Amino acid sequence: MTTDGTAVKNRPRKKSGNPWLEAGHRLKKSKIGMAGVVIIGILLLVALFAPLLAPYSPTEQNILFRYQPPSSEHWLGTDEMGRDILSRIIYGSRISLRVGLISISLALLMGVTLGLIAGFYGGFLDMVIMRFMDIMLAFPSILLAIAIVAILGPQLENAMIAIAIINVPRFARIIRSSALSLKENDFIKAARALGAGDFRIIVNHLLPNAMAPLIVQTTLSIATAILEAAALSFLGLGAQPPSPEWGAMLSDARSALQKAPWVATFPGLAIFFGVLGFNLLGDGLRDALDPKMKNA
Amino acid sequence: MKWRSLSVLLVLALVLGAFSLSAFAEGKYGGTFIFGRGGDSVGLDPIQVTDGESFKVTQQIYDTIVQYKPGTTEVIPGLAKEWEVSDDGLRWTFYLREGVKFHDGNPVNAEAIKWNFDRWRLVDHPYHIGGDFTYYSYMFQGFPGIIKEVNAVDEYTVEFVLTEPQAPFLNNLGMVSFGIASPAAVKKWGEDYFKHPVGSGPFKFVEWKKDDRIVLEANEDYWGGRPYLDKVVFRSIPDNGARYMELQAGTIDMMDYINPEDVASVKENPELDLVLRPSFNVGYFAMHQNFPPFDNVLIRRAFNHAINKENLIGAFYAGLAQPAKNPLPPSLWGYNDEIKDYEYDLEKAKELLAKAGYPDGFEFDLWYMPVPRPYFPQPKLVAQAIQYYLSQIGVKANLKTVDWGTYLDKYYADELPTYLLGWTGDNGDPDNFLYVLLDQTQNNCGYKNDELHEILLEAQRTVDHERRVELYMKAQEIIHNDAPWVPIAHSTPPLVKRSYVKNYIPNPTSTEKFHRVWLDK
């Protein structure tokens, strides 16, 4: 991406110029994609300015005022420890975003490295790496995550590692298939003829050209990562109290579902919108980046 | 004519009334009674377990030599119909009921009782296997402890010879942990006996699906009369809310550990009854003195000042509890009401921390149990509240938990630096709280105090009641001063039943036999 980026500046802007810019235009036209952008934008702002937005501290308890219904004092009511639910959701956005971004970055790093190596070199190395990925894919992902957290110990950091690991095979597969088809192209042969080494070819030529599907997958994976983190926390394997993680909030609200439904409703909605935002953006990006959709 | 029809009606009404009255008094046979509870049993060999969820079930399967009158801790005949004690208090003779049989058909006689006690107390007994026999050493001071000999005098007479008099001896024998097992079954299953329990109690073991259910069926030949119920099922439903929903839906007939916030809705529901178990427990937060800085009494006192018990009880017990200042519950004799509790005072707590050399606080692990207990109906929430209180004096608690069986294992292995736990009295004697929980040879919080040890041993040996009261009063003073725990609450545990469940009498000791319970449906 960086090589393309620098190249762009010297080129005159034409309609058929930079494919990334074109994709950006297409994304702007896509209503779904823009809805995703807006939701994620709000989420980012909320996370960034949490201390300014939250009316109370997310961990401040008042156990004599548990399960207060929504009121002017507590807009979304209070939870089982008498904490302000709105403040907890606001601070929770930081956790969910962090989990999504960090765990998927890790997955991206590992998956892309493995996938490129497998795709580029092929042969025995390819077989070993990809069969291992197949084994990982054979497990239901959440089960694998639970097993990993069980080994590492229940903690948000470990949950992130677990989520990163279960997402590796998808990235590895995508990048490998791109690498397989790309490496037969003439421009790769040309680069090799000019004396470029393996590393240079992989990083400067293969990777940038395999970017489009990767971006889509990354965006969609952040959505599932948020969901997976919430699920792990729901099971008590992720964020530990008093951390205002959305899934953990949902889990703690369970026992009062009949009496105080708002305690479960609002964190549930927060998860819903967070996941929806990244999914919409992912869909929008897929349409925008797909060359077949170019003139549609 | 008019009068006659009236009188006919009157007679009819009387007859019907008599019928319905007798129906109440007599009870109906048949039906399956499903009891929903918060966790599975650890094991069904009562001598090997210490948790209420195991005892709840073994109480139905086993008999003890003596037992407690329903709703009290008063001793009444069990397998023994009468007994006598020598003047020096060292020789106890029990005369057993004749013709009682274990579920496998073998007779419950003096030999069987001797065999059970020998298995428990003799470390070199071939069947002293499968666990630590914790309760035996708790109550009788180690192995073989104070029981020197158990003799089968004849078929139905068994004699205990003690090395020293023990005031609570008779009460101890009635404890659910000393249920008499069929020697043949123990020999047959060995280490796996805890999965194949055979006793002589009102219900026989049928099956155990781990973490799901335990099924028992009526013992037709029970010496106390055939149980009204045909079958008893104990179901594990860990979530309090889910369990309550099942009760409302009628898929279970009774449950314990209701969320305090649901108590009000039970009172409004005509199909449900609240049954209050007499308060006989203590829930506490222990600080293990093997883990610095908890070896410093100032830190322990600081914690005592930092936790607001009144609010905890208001929030998490629906008011069905009172704040604890002693390990003993107030309903038990020997309770020292003159002790002044450490008051809730954050400034004082901070001062003590600074004096102990931790003005900026420190970080530690706080363990809470994963299942509701009578003394902590919502342990996770109590732990979070304590975490918050301590954060206000600058101390950071990391909350930890693990499944219930492992939690207890870690507790016995002294692996928990601080933890929530509690105790329900088993036999109505202060010894069963103070010695078991805090004596230096017994406790799992690293607490050592020689003076306390001497006092507790003397109280066990003393038969004079007044003197024992005096000793236990003194013991509570010492404990208060050393502050090994933050005592939190003495709860009145609520149970909830469908209103057709009749004659359920809750015992203070937390378990009761179901053979007099019947279903009016």
Image (tube, rainbow, N blue to C red):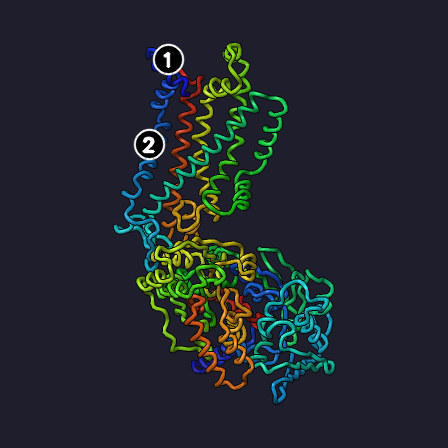
Q: Position of residue A50 (x, y in %)?
A: 31, 42
Of B335 and A144, nearer the camera is B335
Give me the chain letter of mark 2. Answer: A
Depth order, front residue of B293/B314: B293
Q: Which residue is mark 1?
A: A17
Q: Which residue is mark 2?
A: A38
Residue furthest toward the bottom?
B87
Instruction: Tell me: residue B70, above or below residue A47.
Output: below
Q: Is residue B238 above or below residue B452?
A: above
A81 or B475: nearer the viewer? B475
- Count the marks: 2
Question: What is the x, y in percent for residue A219?
Answer: 43, 30
Which residue corresponds to the image point at 32% horizontal and 50% vertical from the top-left?
Answer: A84
Question: Of the residues tagged 1 and 2, which is closer to the observer?
Answer: 1
Q: Horizontal and vertical percent for residue B34?
A: 55, 62
Report in which chain the residue with disc 1 lies: A
- The amino acid type, in three-letter code, at marker 2 is Val
Q: Is residue B440 visible?
A: yes
Say which quarter of the image contains residue B84.
bottom right
